[in-house]
C-alpha cells in the first residue's frame, strides 16, 4: 500500500498536513507533529512585521465545533526565519508549507520574496484577511479581481517552488475565485479557511464570550460544508487542492480526497485528539485501504467528482 502524495513535485509521505495556525509556532512544535506522523506542516500566517493578535478569550471548543479569533498574532518574518530555519535544518523533516499574509497587495510581494528565502517547499498565500485598501475592507478572497491580483504578484516573485492560495469558504461561488487564482498562475489551492464569522454568548452574563465578539468556525460541525467547497473547487479547476475543515478521522481524510483533495489539513482535530491524531488517522487510512483493496491512495483523489 502506498500513501505518498506527489503535490506539484513535492513528495509527502502521507496526505495529512498540519493546518496553518495550529501548533505551528516553533520549530520544535513542527518536529513534534512530524514525529507523530504528519505528512507535512504549515506555518501559521507570517506577516512582514510583528502583528498583535486579539486579547483573550480568543478560542473555545465544544464537541461539535471550534471557534477562534486569535487575530493572526505573529512575530513577523524575522522571527519566522529563526523558527522555520530550525525545522528546515532537521534531517527527518517532512515538507514545510510557509503561509504568508498581508493587508495590501504590494506587501504580499515583499513577504513572499522573504518567505521564499527561508526555504519552504511550498508557499501558501492566506487571502482571507481584509484588504485594507478596499473601501469596505473586504477580504481578498471575496473578489475574483483581488484574489487574482494577489496570486499574480506572488507568482511573479516566487521562483522554483509551488505557490498555493488559501481560499475563504464564505463566498457565494468558490469556483469562480478558484478559477481567478488558477488563471493568474496558482499552482494549487487550499480549501478552506474557517467559516463565519460565528458567535457564542455566555448566557449567564448575556455577553459574547470571545473578546473580539466574533470568530472563525472550524472543527467537526463544518466538515460537510468544507467537503462541498472542495468538490466545487475540484469541479472548477485542474490544479491540485489541499482540503480541510473538521477532519478528525482517517475516513474524513478519504472523504476529502474523494471530493478532490490531494492533501488534507488537520487543524482543530489536534485539539480533539492531540498531536497523536496524525498517527491514528494514518492507521485508520491503512485499515480502510486494506478493507477496500486500495493499493495507491492517490488513485482516489477526485473519485466522487469524476462519476
Ligand atoms: C486557532 C486557529 C488558528 C488559525 N490560524 C490560522 C492562520 O494563522 N492562518 C491560516 O491561514 N489559517 C488559520 N486557521 C485556519 C485553519 O488553518 C483551517 O483552515 C481551519 O481551522 C479549518 O480546519 P479545521 O476544521 O481542521 O480546524 C486557524 C484555525 C484555528 C482553529
Image (tube, grey):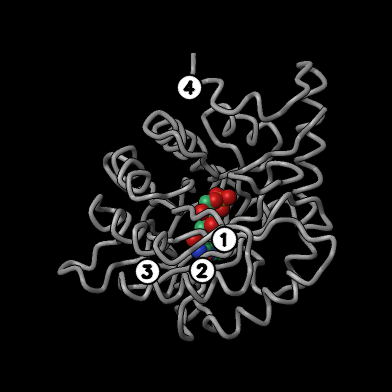
Say above or below: 157 vs 54.
above
* Residue under the point 53% across and 53% down: 162
Which of these two is toward me, 163 or 47? 163
Which SS class for mark 4? helix
Dots 3, 2 in contact, CB < 8 A:
no
Which of these two is toward me, 230 or 48? 48
Mark before the other along the chain sequence, 1 or 4: 1
Residue 72 in picture, x, y percent from top left: 48, 72
* Residue under the point 37% across and 53% down: 196
Q: Is residue 115 left or right of residue 6?
A: left
Q: CA distance from mark 1 to mark 4?
A: 26 Å
Residue at the spot of label 2? 45
Residue 158 in picture, x, y percent from top left: 48, 64
Which SS class for mark 3? loop
Q: Is residue 37 left or right of residue 151?
A: right
Residue 291 in picture, x, y percent from top left: 80, 18
Q: Is mark 2 within 8 Å of ligand 1?
A: yes
Residue at the spot of label 1? 20
Q: Nearer the viewer, mark 3 or mark 2?
A: 2
Residue at the spot of label 4? 305
Residue at the spot of label 3? 213
Which SS class for mark 2? loop
Q: Is mark 1 within 8 Å of ligand 1?
A: yes
Dots 1, 4 in contact, CB < 8 A:
no
Dots 3, 4 in contact, CB < 8 A:
no
Amino acid at each position: 500500500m502506498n500513501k505518498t502524495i506527489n503535490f506539484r513535485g513535492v513528495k509527502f509521505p502521507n496526505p495529512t498536513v498540519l493546518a496553518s495556525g495550529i501548533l505551528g509556532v516553533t520549530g520544535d512544535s513542527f518536529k513534534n507533529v512530524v514525529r507523530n506522523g504528519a505528512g507535512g506542516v504549515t506555518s501559521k500566517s507570517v506577516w512582514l512585521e510583528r502583528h498583535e493578535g486579539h486579547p483573550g478569550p480568543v478560542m473555545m471548543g465544544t464537541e461539535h465545533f471550534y471557534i477562534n479569533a486569535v487575530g493572526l498574532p505573529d512575530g513577523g518574518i524575522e522571527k519566522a526565519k529563526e523558527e522555520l530555519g530550525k525545522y528546515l535544518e532537521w534531517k527527518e523533516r517532512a515538507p514545510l508549507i510557509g503561509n504568508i499574509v498581508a493587508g495590501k497587495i504590494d506587501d504580499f510581494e515583499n513577504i513572499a520574496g522573504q518567505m521564499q528565502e527561508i526555504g519552504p517547499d511550498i508557499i501558501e498565500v492566506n487571502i482571507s484577511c481584509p484588504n485594507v485598501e478596499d473601501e469596505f475592507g473586504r477580504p481578498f478572497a471575496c473578489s475574483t479581481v483581488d484574489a487574482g491580483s494577489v496570486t499574480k504578484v506572488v507568482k511573479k516573485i516566487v521562483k522554483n517552488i509551488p505557490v498555493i492560495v488559501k481560499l475563504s469558504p464564505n463566498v457565494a461561488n468558490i469556483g469562480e475565485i478558484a478559477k481567478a487564482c488558477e488563471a493568474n498562475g496558482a499552482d494549487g489551492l487550499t480549501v478552506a479557511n474557517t467559516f463565519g464569522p460565528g458567535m457564542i454568548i455566555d448566557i449567564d452574563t448575556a455577553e459574547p464570550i470571545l473578546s473580539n465578539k466574533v470568530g472563525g468556525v472550524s472543527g467537526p460541525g463544518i466538515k460537510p460544508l468544507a467537503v462541498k467547497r472542495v468538490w466545487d473547487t475540484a469541479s472548477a479547476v485542474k490544479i491540485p487542492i489541499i482540503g480541510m475543515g473538521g477532519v478528525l478521522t482517517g475516513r474524513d481524510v478519504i472523504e476529502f480526497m474523494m471530493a478532490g483533495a490531494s492533501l488534507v489539513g488537520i487543524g482543530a482535530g489536534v485539539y480533539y485528539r492531540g498531536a497523536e491524531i496524525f498517527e491514528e488517522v494514518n492507521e485508520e487510512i491503512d485499515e480502510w485501504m486494506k478493507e477496500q483493496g486500495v493499493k495507491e491512495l492517490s488513485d482516489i483523489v477526485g473519485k466522487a467528482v469524476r462519476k
